[in-house]
Image (cartoon, rainbow, N blue to C red):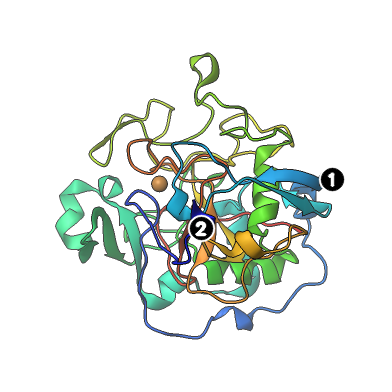
Amino acid sequence: MACSSQTETKTSKGCCTPSAERAETPPIGSQIAVASEMPPGVRERMVPLAGGTFLMGTDYVDSFPDDGEGPVRPVIIEPFLMDRYPVTNHLFQRFIDATGYKTEAEIFGWSFVFWSHIPQSRFASLVEDTVAAAPWWCKVPGAKWNSPEGPGSNLNGRGDHPVVHVSWNDAQAYCQWSGQRLPTEAEWEYAARGGLEQKLYPWGDKLRPDGLHRCNIWQGEFPRLDTGDDGYAGTCPVDAFPPNGFGLYSITGNAWEWCADWFSTDYHCTAGRDNPVGPPTGSTKVMKGGSFLCHKSYCNRYRVAARSSNTPDSSSSNSGFRCCR
Ligand SMILES: [Cu+2]
């Protein structure tokens, strides 16, 4: 079990998010003023959550013990507000219009795009490099939140999709503008469970109850063919599938969601149970929820207890976020 092991292992299996290994630079969000009030419309898209004690983590047999998913432990959460949906492209545009903020993908000049979303006729000219251990991740110069597949691509028809190609630092800058903050991992998981106890998914234990898809993940043979059996190959509207018991949409699948915490596989073995906020330092930040690329044969990380992480300046075509307050 994770808590008996003292060594921190990073087990990022290919379909989650690749690390950008960008140059050391200070976070650039400091240019954004911290808002004391939320801009119009932001509060309206939040749901009040009562908090209380819930069982966090899992001892599920098909989980990844090296990820630090277990053991199951009771955690206390204060009442808070959570975004009903991930931050959409439309909302992120408002943030950019108001602040002129440049995302890290723009500053560094590139981001990771999943191979099959790049027009094959322009593949050679768009892709600069691929990730050795996960060659389906392509380094595309010019890929950014509003050109998700690189130069020539745009957000037409995707205003209500989760914004992607945002780093943790970008999400943090957005929060400064919106008067919100990123959820802790414990808050995120409490919210994701939607009032159910120790279920695999936000709606229960069956991935497809009554044969119906409940989230946007990968179907087919990863990484070659996404059949899009759930209706989507790539991101989808944030309200494409029904909400969980707390009224929260797009919790699993679609895009990974950044959390406030530094990632650790054994922090929770010694941490207090009362509103845990993660270790004081680390090298990567927690991500939750999985994405449109997650598949049981690869990572099975679209379960509510599943976790991944990445460096705070990494971005990819499946990394997004939602906020709380
Ligand atoms: Cu995955």
Q: Where's residue 188, x and y in %?
A: 66, 51
Q: Where's residue 163, x and y in %?
A: 52, 54
Residue 193: which quarter of the image?
A: top right
* Kind of residue sitting beneath label 2: Ser
In space, the residues marked 1 and 2 are separated at their CA atoms by 33 Å
Mark positioned earlier in the residue sequence (1 or 2) = 2
User: Residue placed at 70% from the left, 32% from the top?
Assistant: 196
Secondary element under disc 1, as helix, strand or loop, is loop
Q: Is residue 218 visible?
A: yes
Q: Which residue is mark 1?
A: 50
Q: Is residue 218 above or below residue 307?
A: above
Q: Where's residue 70, x and y in %?
A: 56, 48
Q: Is residue 163 visible?
A: no
Position of residue 153 in the picture relative to residue 260 (left or right): left
User: Residue placed at 69% from the left, 71% from the top?
Assistant: 176
Q: Is residue 281 above or below residue 8?
A: below
Mark on residue 238?
none
Q: Which residue is mark 2?
A: 4
* Kind of residue sitting beneath label 1: Ala
Badge 2 crowding class, 10 Å Cα cut-off, few under 14, some 14 to 19, many 20 or more, is: few
User: Residue placed at 46% from the left, 54% from the top?
Assistant: 67
Position of residue 322 in the picture relative to residue 125 (left or right): right
